[in-house]
Image: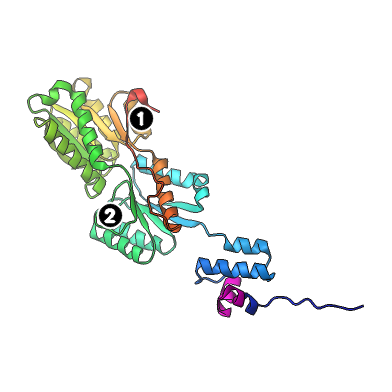
């Protein structure tokens, strides 16, 4: 009986067929890093065609690895931002079709040095970063450094001017501020054109471009359409309920005729408490941002008049789409819907 020897393919043949070096084939077949994805696919396809590896093994190796995306969320009491972080952590099935893995990471609020440090830290282990920007040269420099390393960044909710970020996902914040001013004036009725009515603003921090732009839009609408309204100034409460309570209480004590309050950031419950304490006869119009359990409760009991909000899941999905577009060589915002604001009243609560 005659025996036939089966000639098995060699690595040299795989290298020749894939048109790469033997060293590159060795790196790919042993799972070492430092080889471009397109080269890995070419080597594994050649190895499978020659029978050097099984087809299933080749397809598994050629499958692109999921994009590792980090969302840097300011830590603290802002309930809308906490909702956003929870959504990122619990909604993995929504991102699966895009072959990405999203992780929410919390960073110190209102601290540009800490934000810049975390951007550079997470840039070493992920493929893209979405973050709420603080206007500061250190943050801008960190974004530029990441761009040079090939790690794209997307600003979320608050943008960063003159930066190397790939895209911005969020509201037109000047328009949001104008909307807040318009709502307050309309709720005030004829008093908005009366003898110097007073309104006030409380921001989280004007170091957020979003808050600065909302303030600008708010002021400009009154200047253009209701020049008699006197805006008594912006205060910063850092989204903290107790700080916002003290700020609102001081405003209400200093201005007995205060007709409206615009809460630019979070911590609405603190302002609501101060308004309830002065009684219904002195209640100012109260407009804020972000539909959360506390603002919902304030709408229901009539303390708050309207909430300007955006869909948090839609915002995160837009970030995911942008990173997927960048990975696939498309325009960053291809197929990405513009974030639209919603105005929620007690009567149209979802």
Mark 1 lies on a secondary structure that is helix
Colouring used for the render: rainbow
Q: Nearer the viewer, residue 305 or 109?
A: 305
Residue 206 position in % (x across, y down): 21, 47
Residue 333 position in % (x across, y down): 37, 50
In the drawing, what numbered circle is on residue 198? none
Q: Residues within 10 Å of mark 1 (few under 14, many from 20)?
A: many
Q: Main secondary structure of the magenta part?
A: helix
Q: Is residue 56 left or right of residue 162?
A: right
Residue 98 position in % (x across, y down): 49, 50
Based on the picture, tell me whether residue 24 belongs to the magenta stretch.
yes
Mark 2 lies on a secondary structure that is loop
Q: Quadrant of residue 55?
A: bottom right
105 vs 55: above or below: above
Q: Which residue is mark 2?
A: 111
Q: Quarter of the image containing the C terminus?
A: top left
Q: Which residue is mark 1?
A: 296
Evaluate if marks 2 and 1 touch, with contact meaning CB atoms under 8 Å apart.
Answer: no
User: Which of disc 1 and disc 2 is earlier in sequence?
Assistant: 2
**Residue 83 in sight in this render:** no
Based on the picture, tell me whether residue 323 belongs to the magenta stretch.
no
The residues bearing labels 2 and 1 have C-alpha atoms spaced at a distance of 29 Å
Q: Is residue 118 left or right of residue 93?
A: left
Q: Is residue 154 left or right of residue 260?
A: right
Count the marks.
Answer: 2
Q: Residues within 10 Å of mark 2 (few under 14, many from 20)?
A: some
Q: Nearer the viewer, residue 30 or 329?
A: 329
Q: Quarter of the image containing the N terminus?
A: bottom right
What's the residue at 51%, 71% (across, down)?
A: 35
Residue 320 position in % (x across, y down): 43, 50
Read off the magenta span: 15-30
What's the residue at 58%, 79% (across, down)?
A: 22
């Amino acid at each position: 009986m005659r025996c036939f020897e089966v000639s098995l393919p060699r690595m040299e043949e795989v290298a020749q067929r894939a048109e790469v070096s033997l060293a590159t084939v060795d790196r790919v077949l042993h799972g070492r890093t430092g080889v471009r994805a397109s080269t890995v696919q070419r080597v594994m396809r050649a190895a499978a065609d020659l029978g050097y590896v099984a087809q299933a093994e080749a397809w598994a190796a050629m499958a692109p690895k999921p994009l590792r995306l980090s969302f840097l969320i300011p830590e603290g009491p802002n309930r809308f931002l906490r909702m956003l972080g929870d959504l990122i952590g619990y909604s993995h099935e929504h991102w699966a079709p895009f072959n990405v893995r999203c992780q929410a990471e919390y960073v110190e609020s209102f601290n540009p040095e800490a934000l810049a440090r975390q951007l550079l830290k997470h840039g070493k282990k992920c493929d893209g970063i979405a973050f709420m920007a603080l206007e500061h040269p250190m943050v801008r420099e960190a974004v530029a450094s990441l761009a040079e390393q090939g790690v794209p960044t997307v600003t979320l909710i608050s943008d960063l001017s003159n930066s190397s970020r790939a895209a911005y996902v969020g509201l037109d914040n000047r328009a949001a501020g104008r909307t807040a001013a318009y709502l307050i004036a309309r709720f005030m009725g004829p008093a908005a054109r009366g003898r110097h009515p007073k309104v006030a603003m409380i921001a989280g921090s004007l170091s957020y471009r979003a808050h600065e732009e909302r303030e600008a839009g708010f002021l400009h609408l009154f200047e253009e359409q209701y020049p008699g309204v006197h805006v008594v100034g912006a205060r910063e409460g850092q989204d903290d309920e107790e700080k916002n309570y003290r700020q609102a209480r001081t405003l209400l004590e200093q201005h007995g005729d205060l007709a409206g309050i615009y809460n630019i950031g979070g911590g609405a419950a603190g302002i609501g408490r101060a308004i309830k304490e002065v009684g219904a006869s002195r209640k100012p119009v109260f407009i804020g941002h972000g539909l959360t359990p506390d603002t919902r409760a304030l709408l229901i009991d009539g303390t708050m008049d309207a909430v300007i909000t955006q869909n948090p899941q839609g915002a995160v999905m837009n970030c995911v789409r942008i990173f997927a577009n960048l990975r696939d060589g498309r325009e960053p915002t291809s197929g990405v819907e513009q974030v639209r604001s919603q105005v929620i009243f007690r009567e149209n609560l979802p």
